[in-house]
Image (cartoon, helix red, strand yellow):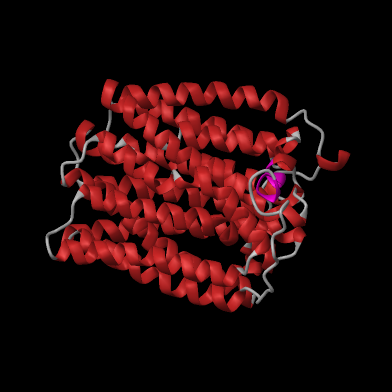
Amino acid sequence: MTPSSRPSASTFRDSLRLLLTRRFGTFWLASLLSNIGTWAQQVAQPWLLLSLGASPWLLGLDSFAMGGPGLLLMLVGGVLADRADRRKLIAVLQSIQALCPVLIVVLLLNGAIQPWIIIALSLVVGVTDALSMPSFQTIVASIVDRRQLPTGIALNTTQFNLSRILGPSLAGVLMASIGAVGAFAVSAASYVPFIAVALWILPRVTVQALGPTEGGGDGQLLAGAREVLRQPALRGAVLTVLAGSALCSPLLTFCPLLVKSVFQADVGQYSLTVSAFGAGGLLGGLLLMAIDPRHDRRPLASWAATGFAGVVVASALNRWAAGLPLLFVLGGLSMTMANASANAWLQAQAPAAIRGQTVSLFMLAMRGGTALGGLLTGLTVSAWGVREALLLNGLLALAVVMGVRRVWLRAPLPGGSA
């Protein structure tokens, strides 16, 4: 019999015990600090671009520059996660990434910042993210046992969404007091604890040489992706995440345009709205921690993705500035439950030998979908307006997610298990 998906207080307490373990607890805290800095920058950056006179198209282009490289490189990052020394990979690529906010701080202090520089640095972040993110995403699976994996992912999702509250709040205070330079400085400093912990927590490994059928092209680079996509029960998770990322995530990308141009509000309202999305995500993560890890996550992921699409539609139709943060709470809740459930499902069902490539496919759907959706939505926003573009996105997402659900929930489990 399938374990109940009803939230349980005892399950929640068991989940919190994982935080008290030395390795996972330290990793969780370092990730929280790192993500606070990341969200501080992600709130400051689009607002800075708009302040510099950037158009909606450039706003979408900046989002694509940050996520677009994942379309080409995320699967390469998955192979690296399975084959390379993840300690060195994360340390080197994250160090390169940390230099980007440092450079922006220097240029801001000297009055030399330009939109094209910000977009170019976003491209650098996008490339390093694509190559390192699959390694980062497999850390939880390497420090908890398989039975605790859904709990570990839920806890990791909780810290991410807690940072989504604290980071924008901090950015709002800094931008209102000392300007955007403060948010970028916090972002640069936040890389240090995560790199240090990753070097400590991950084991040293011997790099495995890639043979002619393991390196790229038609070999190992696509073998794991093909293995995942040929199974309807796994393919449904990827398609659900892709639909939400490409069609619903632009709600966050174009949030500053909604706040500044539609509601004529200031950076405080923008910071509050993004923080509200994080608050919803935090609530979603807490709810996931209270659900039995053995529960089939497919229905939960699918219905949550449907809810996220509904929030996008409602946000496009909303006429009250005060209602926007409330809708964003629901958006954060539904997106978190959809993506975290799909991620836990994929990692739990994937063979250990291709877990990194499985995660890279999930990240490709999430990050690459967000980037492509931001770019295309930037075009429709420029042509029709932000409300109309988001309404179209939300309706399309509803149709796609409901269509995928019909096949996904009926598909047999990998390996033929019941």
Q: Is residue 275 left or right of residue 303?
A: left
- Image quarter hosting the N terminus: top right
Q: Position of residue 144 (x, y in %)?
A: 70, 66
In the image, residue 111 sits, relative to residue 244, either above or below, namely below
| Residue name at image x 40 percent, y 66 percent | 96
Q: Quadrant of residue 339?
A: top right
Nearer-the-camera pick, 194 or 24: 194
| Residue name at image x 40 percent, y 56 percent | 125
Q: Position of residue 145 (x, y in %)?
A: 75, 64
In the image, residue 243 sits, relative to residue 207, either above or below, namely above
Would residue 220 be counted in the magenta stretch? Answer: yes
Would residue 83 be counted in the magenta stretch? Answer: no
Q: Is residue 352 left or right of residue 34?
A: right
Q: Quadrant of residue 143?
A: bottom right
- Image quarter hosting the C terminus: top right
Q: Position of residue 371 (x, y in %)?
A: 43, 40
Q: Is residue 279 left or right of residue 48?
A: right
Nearer-the-camera pick, 6 or 360: 360
| Residue name at image x 21 percent, y 63 percent | 181
Q: Please say whether residue 150 is visible from this viewpoint.
A: no
In the image, residue 272 sits, relative to residue 136, either above or below, namely above
Q: Which residues are magenta?
A: 219-225
Q: Please say whether residue 194 is visible from this viewpoint.
A: yes
Prevailing secondary structure class for the magenta stretch in the rendered image: helix
In the image, residue 392 sits, relative to residue 305, either above or below, namely above
Q: Position of residue 362 (x, y in %)?
A: 60, 45
In the rendered image, the residue lying farthest to the front is: 212
Counting labels gives 0
